[in-house]
Every structure is written in C-alpha cells, then in structure tokens.
Amino acid sequence: MSFIEHLEELRKRIIRCLIFILVFSIAAYFFSDRIIDFIARPVEQLFFMDPTEAFAIRIKMSIIVGIILSVPVIFYHLWQFVVPGLFVKEIKLVIPVVISSTIFFLIGACFCFFLVLPLGIKFLLGFGTEKLSPMIKISSYVSFVSYMTLAFGAVFELPVISYFLGRIGLIGPQTLVKGRKYAIVGILILASFLTPPDLFSQIMLAGPLYILYEVSIVVLKVTQKKKKDEEFS
C-alpha cells in the first residue's frame, strides 16, 4: 500500500470507530441519570453552577461511556491497521491481542474506579475543616473521574504491548531491564501528565505503572523462551 492508501485505510477505520462510539453514546445518554448517580457514589453531593452545565455533563458522560464500550472495536481496528505490515504468524496474534487489550483496559479502569478513586477522594476531601467544606462541581468531578479511569485503562495495556512487540522481535527483556532507571523517571513524568495536578493521584498511577513495567519484563522473558522453543521444534 502507498502512503496515501495507508491514510485512506486509517480514515476508514477511524470513521468506523467513531460510528460505534456515537451509537453507544446515544444509548448511554438514556441511562445518564443512573450513570451519574453511580460515579457520584464516593461523594455526598455534586453541584452545577450554570444552567447548561447539567445538560452538558450528561453529553460528556455519555461520550465517555461510549468510548469505554467501544474499546474492543477500537482495539480491533487499531490492530487491523497494523496487520498489513505483519507476517502470517504475527497476524494470528491479532484476535488474542485484541481480547487481551480489552481485558487489561477494563481491569485498569475497574482498579481505578473501585479502589483508587474512593481512596483518593477520601484522602483529598480529608483536608477540609469545619470552615473549609467541599462544594464539588459536577464538571470538575466528572473530568477527574474520567481522566483517571481512562489513564489507568491505558497504562494497563503495557504488558499486552510488550508481549506483541516481543513476539515480533522489536524488544526483549534485556531492553527493559537495562532501561529500568530511565523508565522510573519516565513513569513519574507520564503520571504527572495523565493525572490531575495532585501528588496522590500521580503516585497512585505511578505505582501500578511501575509494577506493570516489571510484569512486562516477565512477559517478555516468557515470550522469548516460547519463541526459542518454537524455532527449535
């Protein structure tokens, strides 16, 4: 495929993903009341400050849910876009990688929503006093929850990406072992970009991300051993 043909292929796949996101977002809008009540469980009360904010937040929340529900489709089209540059044995990995990517994304999102967020919100609201009480805007709260959930879902893809890159021979466990000290700095920088500007959120993302980095090393060692066994068999 020429460069223009690659761009046309990318455009088609982006449009297909957007169609799925739109459909799921419209469906999610009809349940927006329940969704907002569900995500607002860690706090007692949320407020909107202008007449359009409550409606706008329903639209935003519906789109975010639409993106999350479309994750399998997005991963499928992402890997299908990569397929033309792969060998036959590597193409067979696409479906397992798509399934694994979806599972790891959902694990990361659930880990954030059900564990990190309740602890984080409790910690942050604990700085209030009798005269300093929280009045949390719905837009700020939804943005905080969304960024954290999507960020955790994204970084939990690290073992899957490492496995795929290891299978096609682009990286090995030695690469990650040698780059560990640089990775720690990179993880801290990445966590500061992906989370709201508070130390607690950054640490809560950086910790699991470093653990996933070490898990990726183990995954690459297993992948490397498996490739050698396949070559000798």
Image (cartoon, rainbow, N blue to C red):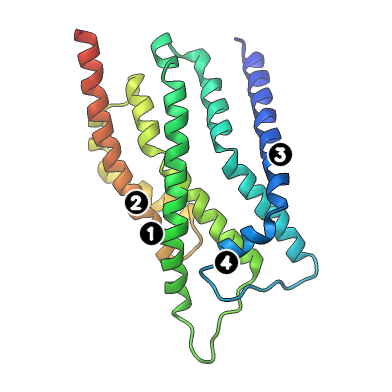
Q: How far apart are marks 2 and 3 (CA)?
A: 33 Å
Rendered position, 109 above or below 126: above
Q: Distance between the residues labelled 4 and 2?
A: 24 Å
Residue located beneath label 3 in the image? 23
Q: Distance between the residues labelled 1 and 3?
A: 33 Å
Given the current orientation, which residue lies at the most extreme bottom position?
130
Residue 196 shown left or right of residue 8 in the figure: left
Residue located beneath label 4 in the image? 40
Label annotation for residue 204: 1
Rendered position, 170 above or below 29: above
Residue 115 shown left or right of residue 11 in the figure: left
Q: For mark 1, give the secondary structure.
A: helix
Q: Which of marks 2 and 3 is nearer the N terminus?
A: 3
Q: Which residue is drawn at 23% across and 10% down?
A: 231
In terms of depth relative to the viewer, which is nearer, 200 or 190?
A: 200
Mark 1 crowd level (few <14, some 14–19, many ≥20, 10 Å Cα): some
Residue 132, horizontal then vertical, whole percent: 54, 87
Rendered position, 192 above or below 92: below
Mark 2 crowd level (few <14, some 14–19, many ≥20, 10 Å Cα): some
Q: Earlier in the sequence, mark 4 or mark 2?
A: 4
Tell me the quarter of the image containing the N terminus: top right
- Give the number of callouts: 4
Residue located beneath label 2 in the image? 208
Mark 4 crowd level (few <14, some 14–19, many ≥20, 10 Å Cα): some
| CB within 8 Å, label 2 to label 1 | yes
Mark 3 crowd level (few <14, some 14–19, many ≥20, 10 Å Cα): few
Name the kind of residue labelled 3 in the image. Answer: Val
Q: How far apart are marks 4 and 1 (CA)?
A: 20 Å
In terms of depth relative to the viewer, which is nearer, 180 or 40?
A: 40
Q: Which residue is drawn at 54% across and 91% down?
A: 131
The part of the image, by quadrant, that contains residue 41 is bottom right
Q: Distance between the residues labelled 3 and 4?
A: 24 Å
